[in-house]
Amino acid sequence: MQATDERVNLLGLSPARLRAWFAEMGEKPFRASQVLKWVHQRRVEDFDAMTDLAKSLREKLKQVACIETPEVLLEQVSSDGTRKFIVDIGGGNSVEMVYIPEDDRATLCISSQVGCSLTCTFCSTGRQGFNRNLSTAEIVGQLWLAEKRIERRLPTGKAISNVVFMGMGEPLLNERAVVDAAELMLDDHAYGLSKRRVTISTSGIVPAIDRLAEHLPISLAISLHAPNDALRDELVPINQKYPLDVLMAACDRYAKVVPHGAIVYEYVMIDGVNDTPEHADEMIALLGPRGDEVKVNLIPFNPFEGSDYRRSSRNRIMRFATRLRDAGINTVPRKTRGDDIDAACGQLVGKVADRSRRQDRLAQMGLDRGVVEVTG
Ligand code: SAH
Ligand code: SF4
C-alpha cells in the first residue's frame, strides 16, 4: 500500500502511541491490542482483513492510516545457514539485516541508521558516513520482514528468538525510534520477546545509556574495543566525548537495574593493534573489579576493502581469552558466521551499490540475472 503524507503508518506506532492515537479518534484503547496483533503477529497489510474490527472502523482506518512495510532487495545465503538481506527503505537507500540460526534459537541483527556518523576506524559502516536515521517502522519492519520470510520456526512458533541492534548505525543516536521499535518487540500483542533477548549495541553514548536504564532496561552490548583512552580515542572516536571512566560508571549504573549478565563487552580483535598480552592485562585492570558479572565477547576483525587492519590469528585470540579467563572474566571468542558472504556490517550494502551499477550495465546489455544470490 502506498502511503500519502497524511496517512499514519501503523507499523511504526509503539503500543503506547497506538493507544493514544485510537483515543484521539474516540476509539477504545483495546483497539490498539487488536491492531497490534493483526499487523505484527498475523502480518496483515490490508485493513479489510481485520475482521474483528467493525466495518465502519476499517473504512475510517483506510482513510487515515496505512501499513507500509520494507522490502528485500537482495538476499544471500551462507553455507552455515546465515542469511543476509539488503532491505530497501525507499529513496535509493538500503540497510542490512542478518539472520543467524542456531540449534534452539535464531538471532536477527538489525540496523538503526543508514550509515553512521561515528567513524570507528575498523568499521565499514563508519567509512560510508551518515545518511539518515531509520524510522520506527523501518526498524521494527526488519523483524516483521524476517518473521514473514523465514520458513524455519522455533518451538515457540516464531522465526526469531533474539534481536540485536548490531547492524548499521549507532542505535543510541536514533534513540526515540529505536526505543519505540524495542517496545514493540517486547509487547505481548506484537512480538513478545523478553527484555533479555533484545540487545542494543552501542559505542557508548552515556546519557542515552542512563535514559535506557530508567525507561527500558533491555540487554546492552558495549563496543569497548580498547582498554585505554589513548587507543580507544583512536579506534572509537566517540571515546573523546565519553571516555572510559565515564562509560564504565554508566555501565555500573545500568548493571544495577538489569539481571546478571545483561551487559556484554564487545572487543574486536585486530592484529597487532589491540590484541597483545599487555592489552589483555589492561582489560583485566579495567573490568576485573566487576568480577564474574562481566562478560566479554572477542570478535575476530572482519576485513573489508580499503582497510589496512588484519584479523588477529586464532592463536592470539585464544591467548587473549585465556588471560582474561584466568583473571576470572567470562570471555567468549565469538565464532565468525557467514564469512563467505561478507559478515561485517556495512560491507554488503557497499557491494550492492557496486552490484547495482553492474546490474544496470548488464541490464543494458540484456544480461541481467535477477538479484537473489546464493553462495555456499
Ligand atoms: N554502532 C553500534 C552498533 C552497530 S556496530 C556499535 O558500535 O556498537 C555492531 C558491532 O559490530 C560493534 O560491536 C562493532 O564494533 C562491530 N564491528 C564493526 N565493524 C566490524 C568489523 N569490521 N569487524 C568486526 N566487528 C565489527
Ligand atoms: Fe558506527 Fe558502530 Fe560502526 Fe562505530 S562500530 S562506526 S558506532 S556502526
Image (cartoon, rainbow, N blue to C red):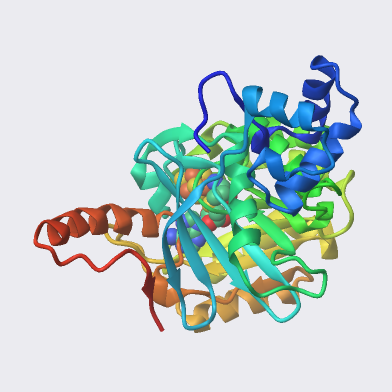
- Residue 317's place in the image compared with 290, above or below, is below
The picture places residue 55, in percent across and down from the top left corner, at 78, 32
| Residue 111 in the figure: left or right of residue 93 | right
Q: Residue at x 28, y 61 (%)?
A: 305
Asked whether 75 or 57 is in front, the reply is 57
Q: Is residue 324 visible?
A: no
| Residue 29 in the figure: left or right of residue 35 | right
The picture places residue 11, in percent across and down from the top left corner, at 66, 38
Residue 372 occupies which quadrant of the picture?
bottom left
Asked whether 209 or 76 is in front, the reply is 76
Q: Residue at x 71, y 24 (%)?
A: 60
Residue 271 occupies which quadrant of the picture?
bottom left
Seen as rendered, the residue at the extreme front is 55
- Residue 240's place in the image compared with 255, above or below, is above
Q: Quadrant of the C terminus?
A: bottom left
The picture places residue 5, in percent across and down from the top left corner, at 51, 20
Residue 245 occupies which quadrant of the picture?
top right
Q: Is residue 20 visible?
A: yes
| Residue 105 in the figure: left or right of residue 372 | right
Q: For the image shown, how many numbered marks are present on the structure?
A: 0
- Residue 214's place in the image compared with 169, above or below, is above
Q: Residue at x 45, y 32 (%)?
A: 132
- Residue 376's place in the image compared with 358, above or below, is below
The picture places residue 346, in percent across and down from the top left corner, at 41, 54
